[in-house]
C-alpha cells in the first residue's frame, strides 16, 4: 500500500526530469494524502506530448457516477490492475508517472503504529507508476489518479508487504505510451525497486494527521524504535 508520500523537487527540476514543459512555483509537500490534488506526468490526448496534470489522489472510473468511490481507489495492485473493472481501461490507455521524493509506511510496534519515511539514499526524486482519469465535467480540469503497488523489497518489507511501483527513467517512455498496456509487455516495469539505493528511518506522529504538512513530518524520530534491517 502507498497511503502518503512527499515531493520536494522544484518545477524546473521536474520539467527536466520528465522532459515535459512546466511553469510556476511548486511548494515542497511533506505529507501528501489521499483526496488531495497531486502532480502527475502523462501523454496529453490532445497533443501526444508529455505534460503535467493536476489530479485528485483517488481514481474515479469513467463509468462511476459516485465520486466518493475515489476514496477507496488510491492504490491499484499491479498483479490484477489489467483485469479489475475500475482500473483496466486506465491501465490500457491512461498511464501516468507521479513524481515523489519519498513515501511513508507504518510498522506496528507494541500495539501502536510507528511511521517510517522511505526515500532514495541520495535524496533524488523518482517516479511512481500511476493511472489517471479525466474530470467528470467539462468545467472540471482536475482529473483523478491512483498509484500502482507491488511486492515490497527488503527495505520496505519489515514495514509492509506492499510498496509503490517505481519506474526508472529508461522506462518512462514505455510506461506512458498509450495503448501499449499489455500485461506481458509492462510486467518487467512492475517489479519491486532494487533495495540497494533506498533507505528508511522512523519519523514522528505528525505525519498521521493529513492536515499537517511541514518539514517535521520527515524528521528523524528521536524515540526508541527497532531498526529496519535490509
Image (cartoon, helix red, strand yellow):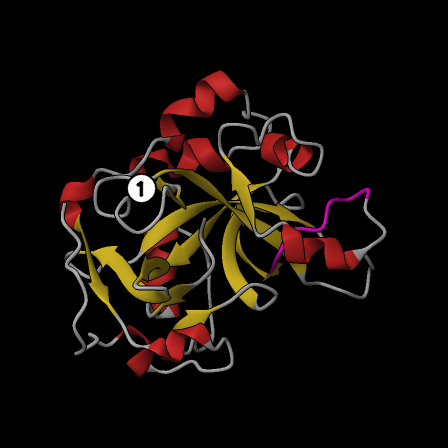
Query: What kind of element bears circle 1?
Result: helix
Compare residues 128 and 160 and report the one nearer the observer.
Answer: 160
Left or right of residue 136: residue 214? left
Compare residues 112 and 119 and report the one nearer the observer.
Answer: 112
Find the magenta span and give its range.
Answer: 57-63
Please tell me which residue is depicted at 23% across the width and 77% down the height of the picture.
219
Magenta segment includes 62: yes
67 is higher (above) or lower (below) than 146: below
Please tell me which residue is depicted at 34% across the width and 59% down the height of the picture.
108
Q: Which residue is mark 1?
A: 169
* Corner quadrant of residue 216: bottom left
* Corner quadrant of residue 139: bottom right
Left or right of residue 12: residue 32? right
Magenta segment includes 76: no
Residue 205, given in percent of the width and then of the height, sits at 36, 77
207 is higher (above) or lower (below) than 74: below
Q: Residues within 10 Å of mark 1 (few under 14, many from 20)?
A: few
Residue 222, given in percent of the width and then of the height, sits at 16, 78
> Residue pushed farthest right?
65
Left or right of residue 117: residue 208? right
Residue 25, given in percent of the width and then of the height, sits at 43, 78
Q: Locate the C terminus by quadrant.
A: top left
Please tell me which residue is depicted at 42% across the width and 80% down the height of the picture.
213
> Residue pushed farthest top?
184
116 is higher (above) or lower (below) than 72: below
92 is higher (above) or lower (below) than 139: above
Left or right of residue 213: residue 132? right
Amino acid at each position: 500500500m502507498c497511503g502518503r508520500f512527499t515531493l520536494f523537487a522544484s518545477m524546473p527540476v521536474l520539467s527536466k526530469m520528465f522532459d515535459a514543459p512546466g511553469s510556476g512555483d511548486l511548494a515542497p509537500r511533506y505529507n501528501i494524502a489521499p483526496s488531495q490534488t497531486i502532480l502527475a506526468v502523462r501523454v496529453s490526448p490532445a497533443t501526444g506530448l508529455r505534460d503535467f496534470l493536476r489530479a485528485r489522489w483517488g481514481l474515479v472510473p469513467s463509468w462511476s457516477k459516485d465520486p466518493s468511490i475515489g476514496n477507496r481507489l488510491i492504490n491499484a495492485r499491479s498483479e490484477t490492475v489489467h483485469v479489475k473493472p475500475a482500473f483496466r481501461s486506465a491501465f490500457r490507455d491512461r498511464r501516468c508517472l507521479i513524481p515523489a521524493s519519498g513515501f511513508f509506511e507504518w510498522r506496528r510496534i507494541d500495539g501502536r503504529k510507528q511511521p517510517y519515511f522511505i526515500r532514495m539514499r541520495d535524496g533524488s526524486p523518482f517516479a511512481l507508476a500511476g493511472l489517471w482519469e479525466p474530470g467528470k465535467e467539462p468545467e472540471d480540469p482536475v482529473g483523478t489518479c491512483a498509484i500502482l503497488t507491488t511486492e515490497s523489497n527488503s527495505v520496505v518489507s519489515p514495514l509492509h508487504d506492499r510498496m509503490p511501483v517505481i519506474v526508472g527513467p529508461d522506462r518512462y517512455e514505455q510506461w506512458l505510451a498509450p495503448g501499449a498496456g499489455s500485461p506481458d509487455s509492462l510486467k518487467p516495469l512492475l517489479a519491486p525497486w532494487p533495495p540497494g539505493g533506498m533507505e528508511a528511518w522512523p519519523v514522528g506522529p505528525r505525519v498521521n494527521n493529513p492536515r499537517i504538512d511541514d518539514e517535521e513530518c520527515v524528521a528523524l524520530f528521536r524515540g526508541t524504535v527497532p531498526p529496519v534491517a535490509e
